Amino acid sequence: MKTRIGLTDFLTLVEEEAFDRFEILDYIEEVTNNHQPYRLKALLHEVDIHICVRRDELESEYWDKIVEALKQCSLQGKEPPYQVLSLPGDEPKKILDKDRLLNGAISMALYPLYQLKQEIVSILKNSLPNVTPKQGQALQELQTQQILSQQDLTPSSNGDFGFYYHLTENGKKVYPIVKELYSKVKLKKEYAIMLVVLNELGYLMNKHFTNKEQLTNALRTTFGNIIGSRQNLFNYVERYSDAPGPAEREEIKRHKQRLLDAISNASQ
């Protein structure tokens, strides 16, 4: 890799096992500016996003096999494998574990990407100072905030870092559903409603909508220029979050129900 390629192309080629380990390590060193911890953490999140998207794509590609495996479970009187998803303000829901249903076929297809994650994690551990477990936890939390606040984490420097980072752990679990729902909307105000809904459900880390520029850039990276200007976006956010009227509350209710229905359908 004499000429640096884009991060998305790199991850695709890693999945295809186009590089040896030394080429991968060279790329990690280059895009993280010689293993700067906050850049390693950001790269790790970007790999997580890519894996999340690819898992969703592979589940679609393997849909016929999933249906057949479910049929076999029914014929044999076996319960399909499930995992539990906890939703804010709601009872935990069982979601079909499609990977286990297919005997790990999805994870095996993504194995090179999981190896890449392990390489980044190992480098990140070695790049951190020697601290106590309590100090290490505090340092990791600080570095997570650095990812969201660093001004030089731009598409031209270290890849496109999007809306995924602004979500809580539970929010990250439903990120593919959110992305699918809101990649199809046509009205700018719907992204503001999305933020309000995610905040009410406990899926948004930035509960008070601070760092508006960072949040706007992340939305633009994920959904495109359709979101409009920062000022326009947060004018709508204020309209729907600060004492909204009956019409606004009804829109929020509709968006929230649509999201919860999509999550529920994904668990069936």
Image (tube, grey):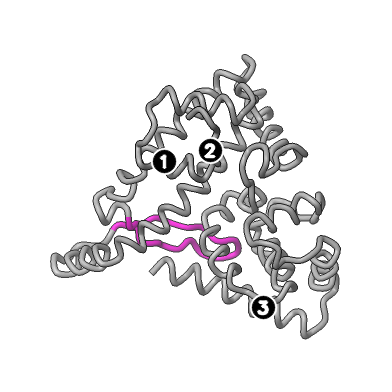
| Residue 172 image point, x, y percent | 56, 52
Residue at 67% x, 37% y is 157
Q: Is residue 174 shown in magenta?
A: no
Residue at 71% x, 33% y is 142
Disc sitting over residue 13 in the figure:
1
Query: Dot 1 lies on which element?
Result: helix
Mark 3 against mark 2, which lies toward the viewer? Answer: 2
Residue type beneath disc 1: Leu
Neighbours of disc 2 within 10 Å: few (<14), some (14-19), many (20+)? few
Residue type beneath disc 2: Ile
**Relative to 44, is 23 on the left or the right?**
left
- Verify CB contact (< 8 Å) between mark 1 and mark 2: yes
Neighbours of disc 3 within 10 Å: few (<14), some (14-19), many (20+)? some
Q: Image height check: is 185 above or below 165?
A: below
Disc sitting over residue 252 in the figure:
none
Disc sitting over residue 253 in the figure:
3
Furthest residue to the front?
Answer: 3
Query: Camera-side residue: 211 or 222?
Result: 222
Magenta residues, as a range? 81-98
| Residue 216 image point, x, y percent | 75, 56
Query: Dot 2 lies on which element?
Result: loop
Residue type beneath disc 3: Lys
Furthest residue to the bottom?
Answer: 247
Mark 3 or 2, nearer chain start: 2
Q: Is residue 91 shown in magenta?
A: yes
| Residue 48 image point, x, y percent | 51, 44
Residue at 13% x, 65% y is 76
